[in-house]
Image (cartoon, rainbow, N blue to C red):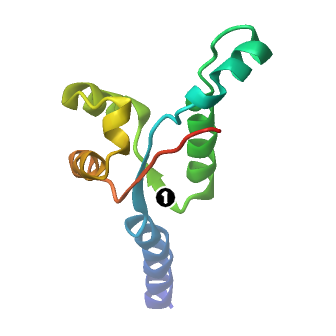
């Protein structure tokens, strides 16, 4: 009986640990919003950074879903600052691949609000 309990405990423990190892690591960058900046200014009365807001909403959904491991914002900002990646460089496939290697992520999500 004790052996069955130990095996059940082991299976439960492994089932909760193993899926975490399969999670893809994701970095989400701020979305570009230059094409809608005048609309943002008209709606909010100031140049509010909606690109960061959209990024934060997406990160929250990804974390809540539990399928992905999302890199922390502070780590992302530190690497971007250290590597001196400008917004235009991030959209370049070569630069994005280099950034992904530096961050140790499987996927980098970038976007533009239009």
The location of residue 32, given as percent across then percent down, is 52, 33
Question: At x 68% / y 8%, what residue is drawn?
Answer: 46
Name above or below for residue 34 compared with residue 63.
above
Residue linked to disc 1:
68
Question: At x 63% / y 13%, what residue is drawn?
Answer: 47
Describe residue 49's horizontal placement relative to residue 17 as left or right: right
Q: Nearer the viewer, residue 37 or 64?
A: 37
Q: Could you say which quadrant of the image residue 91 lies in?
A: top left
Q: Could you say which quadrant of the image residue 66 lies in?
A: bottom right
Question: At x 27% / y 25%, what residue is drawn?
Answer: 81
For the view shown, which residue lies furthest in the top direction? 45
Describe residue 112's horizontal placement relative to residue 3 as left or right: right
Element class at badge 1: strand
Q: Nearer the viewer, residue 40 or 27?
A: 40
Question: At x 34% / y 40%, what residue is drawn?
Answer: 90
Q: Residues within 10 Å of mark 1 (few under 14, many from 20)?
A: some
Q: Nearer the viewer, residue 62 or 38?
A: 38
The location of residue 65, given as percent across then percent down, is 62, 57
For the view shown, which residue lies furthest in the right direction? 43
The quarter of the image holding the C terminus is top right
Name above or below for residue 69 compared with residue 90.
below
The location of residue 73, given as percent across then percent down, is 42, 33
Q: Could you say which quadrant of the image residue 33 lies in?
A: top right
The location of residue 69, given as percent across then percent down, is 44, 54
């Amino acid at each position: 009986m004790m052996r069955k309990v130990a095996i059940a405990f082991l299976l439960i423990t492994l089932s909760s640990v193993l899926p975490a190892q399969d999670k893809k690591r994701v970095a989400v960058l701020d979305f570009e919003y230059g094409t809608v900046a005048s609309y943002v200014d008209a709606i909010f009365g100031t140049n509010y950074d909606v690109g960061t807001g959209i990024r934060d909403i997406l990160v929250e959904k990804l974390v809540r879903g539990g399928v992905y491991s999302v890199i922390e914002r502070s780590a992302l900002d530190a690497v971007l600052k250290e590597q001196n990646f400008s917004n235009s460089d991030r959209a370049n496939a070569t630069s994005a691949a280099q950034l992904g290697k530096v961050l140790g992520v499987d996927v980098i999500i970038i976007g533009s609000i239009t």
